[in-house]
Amino acid sequence: MFKKILVANRGEIARRIMSTCREMGIATVAVYSDADSRAAHVLSADEAVLIGGPEPSASYLNMDAIIDAARQTGSDAIHPGYGFLSENADFARRCEQESITFIGPPSQVIQSLGDKITARTIMEKGGVPIAPGMTRPCRDLDELATEAEKIGYPILIKASAGGGGKGIRVVRQPPDLAEAFASAVREAESAFGDGAVYLEKYFETVRHVEIQILADRFGHVVHLLERDCSIQRRHQKIIEESPSTALTPSLRTLMGESAIAAARAAGYVNAGTVEFLLTPDLSFYFLEVNARLQVEHPVTEMITGLDLVRHQIDIAAGRKLELKQEDIAGQGHAIECRIYAEDPENDFFPSPGTLEYIREPSGPGIRNDCGVYSGVDVPVYYDPIISKLIVHDQTRDQAIERMVKALKDYVILGVKTPIPFMIDVLESEAFKGGEIFTHFIRTHFPDWKPGEKNRDLALIAWAMNELTEKPRTHQNTGANPIPEPWETLGSWRLA
């Protein structure tokens, strides 16, 4: 087993990985940029190494600096978390060349699955259902137009490389193709350095259902049930749950078997996720494989009782996966809400700044994977995720109630967050009824604003305070010109 693991990431996922390492008796090393010198993940590690400036290219994407940090600290393995270098085949290959264990799939697998067209070809050969579309990259508009006519509108333009909702455009009619093509190519080149795109059939009303898999290097593969990730904004998930309200036991088995087939076809090793689109007639199509730990992995951990990070580490260390498919069963219902520093009134635009105060929710069945603390900054340079709030209860209705309560107990001052928005989503009749799909937000909350009832309540509270507050005087003796804390509380008395 590893003696020391360097976590090549930041924020809540770095702390999450370090937590399991501590339980396993493995020392941890944090890497950080100039912007993260006071970050929570730096304080959580046994050692920390400064690797560069605040820009990701100078720090968390700087392979040389990270490899040097691993050598400097005597780390025998690197866990990449998610994002940054987690699905970078070149980085995994560098680790292999440097005899440092990369806690993830082999570099060749990452490379194959990182190209969506190659991945589609692999899945098709492996018997995994794929959506109608292209099986080669395209950079020519005329060729794209010809293929679009064959597939039939509406179609989806997708970047061949990368993920995270980048380089994706929906085209519903031929006149819109040229502009969407140019826009997708520009975004793909900017995000991934590769402007190649391809087409897939676009389904208007679908769910995004993914299957968690674990695979060891001895050919043993299991799936850990599904997660429904259909509540999305800008093609990115913000609320996930398990089990899905759409899956029957037979469909769950079929999708799980398809995920295992996908892993075998790709030669997959370690933890990963096979993502599918699920249509209203319960047909499903391969979307992609995320060759890493998912942001929403705690949902699976809550219903199965398994520690996915521990299994990742064990598999990377060469241990056999002892889990048997028949032994894996979900208990109850789990929901995750991603808490970002972002403004839901402004198309979820990032809201960086100083976190003046945070009070995390707590209680039975509540887990908050948090990467910040009061007084720290949310930098402009990185994904503005603050935490992942997860709840678990016996039924879906109870889990929704528990999540709403947890969100209402979550206090974050200094930046805007989608917490009020998420409460409204969870309390909506459509969500409670399980009528969810990838365009849920656009359909039910197109111009969301905070509820007026909350503003009215705040005004009433302010007015009552003003009316009931007794006048106070402060005698400034000159020795202490600043009022004592007790003098600033307003009307109060000992109960």
Image (tube, rainbow, N blue to C red):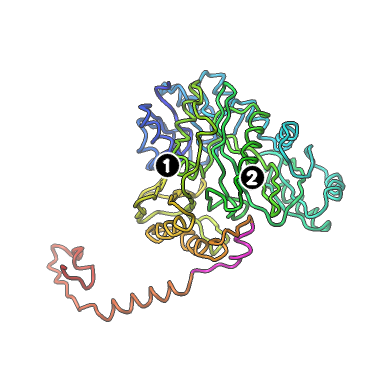
User: Do residues under tags 2 and 1 come within 8 Å of each other at their CB atoms?
Assistant: no
Q: Which residues are magenta?
A: 439-450
Is 447 covered by the magenta stretch? yes
- The residue wearing badge 2 is 251
Q: Amino acid at mark 1?
A: Asp
Name the kind of residue labelled 2 in the image. Leu
Of residues 334 and 425, the one nearer the viewer is 334
Residue 153 image offset from top left, x and y in percent: 81, 54
Whichever of callouts 2 and 1 sits on the residue coming sooner in the sequence is 1
3D distance between C-alphas at marks 2 and 1: 45 Å
Residue 94 point in image, percent of width and height: 57, 23
Residue to which mark 1 is pinned: 36
Of tags 2 and 1, which is closer to the observer?
Answer: 2
Question: Image check: 38 left or right of 298?
Answer: left
Q: For mark 2, give the secondary structure.
A: helix
How busy is the neighbourhood of tag 1: few (under 14 within 10 Å), some, or many (20 plus)?
A: many
User: Which residue is found at the position 49% from the left and 21% from the top?
Assistant: 319
Residue 486 image-quadrant placement? bottom left
Name the spot of residue 118 as percent of width and height, x first: 73, 33
Above-or-below relation of 248 to 448: above
User: Can residue 269 be found in the magenta stretch?
Assistant: no
What is the quadrant of the C terminus in the image?
bottom left
- Rendered position, 20 above or below 250: above
